[in-house]
Image: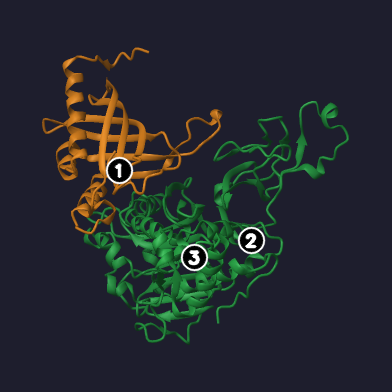
Chain colours: A orange, B green
C-alpha cells in the first residue's frame, strides 16, 4: 500500500497541496473561473474527462482512451471563460449553484519533480428551483508543478463514476 | 374543459388539432409533454419506423457488439461469425431476462444469468444446463432471441425496424439518400465514428432535438450568440441564414447554409481541409451533389424520427486554429414524455490524417457535445419547452405553438422551383416547413393503423 514517493499527511508539502485545492475549489464555487485559469493553471494544461462505458469485468474499468466528455487546452478553457463573460451564455445565466467537495487527498512526488495529486471529487449542483441536486462523483488525477514560483495545474483527468451523464450540461469545471 | 374527459379523449383531440393546425403552422404545446401521446409514440413511431442503431465502424470484427435501444427497449447489435449484422431483442426466451450485460464488447455467446440459456451471435439458442433432463426434445430453433423485423445499412449507417410491413430502408429514406451521400459518401472511403458515443440525459422531449436538427437555423442568432462572440463559428448570423430548407422526403428534412455563389470566399465543403476536399470525387456523387456540397457551409438534418446529422465548421480554440468541418451524428432516445437521452458520436472521414482527425474531434467536442459552447445552451430551451408541454395551463388555455415561418405571406422564404435535388426546397432559411414536414409525417404515423403506411412524397 505504501507508495515510496508518497508525501505524508501532515507534512508541510502536503498542507501546501491541501491549501491549493481548497483555494481552487473556492474560486470555482464562487464563479471566479477567469482568476482560476489565469492564476492556477499552466498554459500547458491538458484537462480531460474521458467517456466511460459499462463493460464486463475482464475488460477493465470501461474508460475510453480516445474519446471524452471534455478534452480541453488552455485556449479552449479560455474560450469557455470568454463565453460566460459574453452575456449570452444562457446555459449558466442565471448560474447554477455549484459546490466542489474534495476529499481523500493523496500526494506523491513524481520523477520529473512535479507532484501527482489524486483526490475524490463530489460536485453538488442545483439549477433554477431544483430541489433534487445534480451530483457528479469521480476521481481527480492532477499533476501540479511550479511555474513562476507558484503551483500550477499541468494535467487534470476526471474519472467519473457514471456512464450516462444526467446533468443538463457540462458548463462546469471539475 | 369538462372533468369527465378521459385521457384518451385528450390525446385524440391533440392529434386532431395537430392534423388540422399544421397547414396553418399551429401545433399543440401538449404534444411535448402528454403521457398518452408519448405511449402512442412508442408504439406507432418507434415500433414501426426505421430507427438508427449504430455505425458499422463500431462493430468492425466478428463477435463485436454494442447495446442500443429501439424506443425504450434494449437490442444487441452484433456482427456474427459470417460478418452479418443482427439486431436482437435483449430478452431471454425463457424468462425475459436481459442477456447482454455491457454497453459494448466482443463475444461468441450471450449467456442468460438466470438459468443459463445461451445464444450465439445470430441469436440461435445454443443450449441450457443439463439440456436433456430439462428440455429433452424441445426444439431449439423456435427459441432463439427475437430479432428486429428488418435491418439494413446505408453508407455505413445501421437502421432497423420492428414492423414487417415497413417499406425497404431505401424507400423509407427516399430523397434523403441524395443528401446523406453528400455527408457520408463524399469519397470512396466513407466515414467512421471516433470512439464510443457520449450519452447524456435531459428533462426534455425527444421531438425538441429532432425538430431543431430538421433545420432550426433561426435560433442561432439568439441562443448561440456567445459562440460568435468567442470566434467559434466563421459565418455571421445573417449570412448563415442564406441557404436552403429542404423537405427531402416525408418526415426527413434538412437545411444547408450555402454561399450565394461558388466564388464566395467563405468555407467550402463544410470547411473540410483543402487537401482532403481534393479527394471528394464524382465516382459516388453526381456533379450536382458535388457542386452543392462544395458551396455548403453547414448541413443539419434529421431522419425521422430521431436520427440527426450535423456537419459544420467549428474550432475549439479560435485564437490558434481555424474552423474545420465537424461531423456529428446523434439520436434522441425517448425515455418518457419529458425525458430524453442524447447519444452523440463524432465522425471522421476515413482518409483524414491523424492530425485532421484530432482537429475534428477536439473542435466537435468543444462545440457540439454536452460540454460544448453551442450545445450546452441547446438543452436549456428544450427543458423549458417540455415543462410547458406537460403543463395543465397549456392544455386548458389551448396553447398552440407557432410554426408559421415561411408560410405564404410570412417572411421572405420562397420555394426554389429549379432545385436540382429531390424534395421541396426553399430559399433562404427563414422557414419552418422543414419542421412542418416532420410533424406532418408524425401526425400521419400517429393516426395510421398497424400495417398501413402514409405516402412518402412531399409534394
| Residue labelled with disc 3 | B2
**Circle 2 crowding by C-alpha within 10 Å: few under 14, some 14–19, many from 20:** many
* Residue at x 28% of width, y 74% of height: B238
Give the camera-side residue of B391 and B457.
Answer: B391
Q: Which of the numbered marks, if any, corresponds to residue B48?
A: 2
Give the camera-side residue of B314 and A81.
Answer: A81
Quick check: marks 3 and 1 in contact, CB under 8 Å?
A: no
Q: What element carries label 2?
A: loop
Measured in 3D between alpha carbons, the distance from the residue under mark 1 to the one under mark 2, in whole angstroms, is 38 Å
Q: Where is residue B255 in the image (x, y as percent from the top left)?
A: 43, 71
Give the chain letter at badge 1. A
Q: Which of the numbered marks, if any, corresponds to residue A126?
A: 1
* Residue at x 29% of width, y 25% of height: A103
* Residue at x 71% of width, y 30% of height: B116
Residue extending farthest to the left is A149
Name which quarter of the figure residue A56 lies in. top right
Residue extending farthest to the right is B137
Q: What element carries label 3?
A: loop
Q: Is mark 1 on a helix, strand or loop?
A: strand
Q: Where is residue B72 in the image (x, y as percent from the top left)?
A: 56, 49
Name which quarter of the figure residue B402 lies in. bottom left
| Side (left or right) of B416 relative to A124 | right
Tell me, yes or no, if residue B122 can be seen here: yes
Give the chain letter at badge 3. B
Measured in 3D between alpha carbons, the distance from the residue under mark 3 to the one under mark 1, in whole angstroms, is 38 Å
* Residue at x 30% of width, y 41% of height: A125
Amino acid at each position: 500500500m505504501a507508495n515510496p514517493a508518497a508525501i505524508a499527511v501532515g507534512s508541510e508539502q502536503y498542507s501546501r497541496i491541501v491549501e491549493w485545492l481548497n483555494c481552487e475549489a473556492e474560486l470555482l464555487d464562487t464563479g471566479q473561473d477567469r482568476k482560476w485559469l489565469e492564476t492556477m493553471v499552466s498554459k500547458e494544461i491538458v484537462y480531460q474527462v474521458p467517456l466511460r462505458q459499462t463493460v464486463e469485468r475482464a475488460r477493465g474499468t470501461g474508460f475510453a482512451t480516445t474519446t471524452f466528455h471534455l478534452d480541453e487546452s488552455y485556449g479552449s478553457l479560455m474560450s469557455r471563460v470568454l463565453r460566460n463573460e459574453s452575456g449570452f451564455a444562457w446555459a449558466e445565466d442565471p448560474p447554477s449553484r455549484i459546490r466542489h467537495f474534495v476529499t481523500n487527498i493523496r500526494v506523491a512526488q513524481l520523477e520529473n519533480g512535479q507532484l501527482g495529486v489524486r483526490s475524490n471529487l463530489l460536485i453538488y449542483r442545483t439549477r433554477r428551483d431544483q430541489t433534487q441536486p445534480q451530483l457528479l462523483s469521480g476521481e481527480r488525477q492532477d499533476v501540479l508543478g511550479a511555474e513562476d514560483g507558484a503551483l500550477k495545474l499541468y494535467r487534470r483527468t476526471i474519472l467519473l463514476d457514471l456512464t450516462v451523464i444526467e446533468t443538463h450540461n457540462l458548463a462546469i469545471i471539475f | 374543459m369538462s372533468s369527465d374527459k378521459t385521457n384518451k379523449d385528450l390525446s385524440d383531440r391533440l392529434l386532431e388539432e395537430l392534423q388540422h393546425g399544421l397547414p396553418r403552422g399551429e401545433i399543440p404545446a401538449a404534444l411535448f409533454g402528454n403521457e398518452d401521446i408519448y405511449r402512442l409514440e412508442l408504439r406507432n413511431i418507434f415500433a414501426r419506423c426505421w430507427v438508427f442503431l449504430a455505425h458499422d465502424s463500431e462493430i468492425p470484427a466478428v463477435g463485436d457488439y454494442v447495446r442500443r435501444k429501439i424506443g425504450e427497449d434494449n437490442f444487441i447489435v452484433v456482427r456474427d461469425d459470417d460478418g452479418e449484422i443482427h439486431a436482437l431483442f435483449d430478452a431471454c426466451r425463457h424468462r425475459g431476462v436481459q442477456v447482454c450485460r455491457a454497453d459494448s464488447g466482443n463475444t461468441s455467446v450471450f449467456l442468460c444469468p438466470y438459468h443459463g440459456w445461451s445464444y450465439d451471435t445470430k441469436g440461435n439458442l445454443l443450449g441450457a444446463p443439463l439440456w436433456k433432463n430439462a428440455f429433452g426434445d424441445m426444439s431449439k430453433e423456435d427459441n432463439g432471441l427475437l430479432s428486429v423485423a428488418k435491418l439494413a445499412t446505408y453508407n455505413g449507417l445501421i437502421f432497423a425496424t420492428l414492423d414487417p410491413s415497413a417499406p425497404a430502408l431505401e424507400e423509407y429514406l427516399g430523397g434523403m439518400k441524395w443528401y446523406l451521400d453528400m455527408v457520408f459518401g463524399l469519397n470512396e472511403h466513407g466515414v467512421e465514428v471516433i470512439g464510443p458515443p457520449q450519452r447524456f440525459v435531459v428533462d426534455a422531449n425527444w421531438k425538441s432535438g429532432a425538430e431543431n436538427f430538421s433545420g432550426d437555423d433561426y435560433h442561432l442568432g439568439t441562443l448561440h450568440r456567445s459562440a460568435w462572440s468567442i470566434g467559434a463559428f466563421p459565418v455571421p448570423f445573417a449570412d448563415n441564414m442564406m441557404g436552403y430548407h429542404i423537405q427531402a422526403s416525408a418526415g426527413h428534412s434538412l437545411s444547408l447554409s450555402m454561399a450565394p455563389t461558388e466564388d464566395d470566399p467563405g468555407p467550402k465543403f463544410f470547411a473540410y481541409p483543402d487537401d482532403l476536399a481534393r479527394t471528394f470525387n464524382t465516382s459516388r456523387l453526381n456533379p450536382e451533389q458535388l457542386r452543392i456540397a462544395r458551396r455548403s457551409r453547414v448541413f443539419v438534418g434529421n431522419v425521422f424520427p430521431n436520427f440527426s446529422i450535423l456537419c459544420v465548421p467549428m474550432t475549439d480554440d479560435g485564437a490558434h486554429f481555424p474552423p474545420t468541418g465537424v461531423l456529428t451524428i446523434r439520436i434522441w432516445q425517448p425515455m418518457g414524455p419529458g425525458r430524453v437521452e442524447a447519444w452523440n458520436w463524432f465522425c471522421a472521414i476515413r482518409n483524414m490524417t491523424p492530425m485532421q482527425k484530432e482537429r475534428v474531434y477536439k473542435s466537435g467536442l468543444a462545440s457540439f457535445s454536452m460540454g460544448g459552447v453551442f450545445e450546452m445552451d441547446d438543452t436549456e430551451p428544450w427543458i423549458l419547452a417540455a415543462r410547458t408541454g406537460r403543463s395543465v395551463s397549456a392544455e386548458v388555455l389551448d396553447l398552440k405553438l407557432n410554426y408559421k415561418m415561411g408560410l405564404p405571406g410570412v417572411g421572405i422564404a420562397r420555394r426554389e422551383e429549379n432545385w436540382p435535388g429531390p424534395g421541396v426546397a426553399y430559399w433562404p432559411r427563414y422557414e419552418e416547413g422543414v419542421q412542418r414536414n416532420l410533424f406532418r409525417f408524425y401526425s400521419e404515423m400517429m393516426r395510421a393503423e398497424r400495417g398501413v403506411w402514409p405516402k412518402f412524397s412531399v409534394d
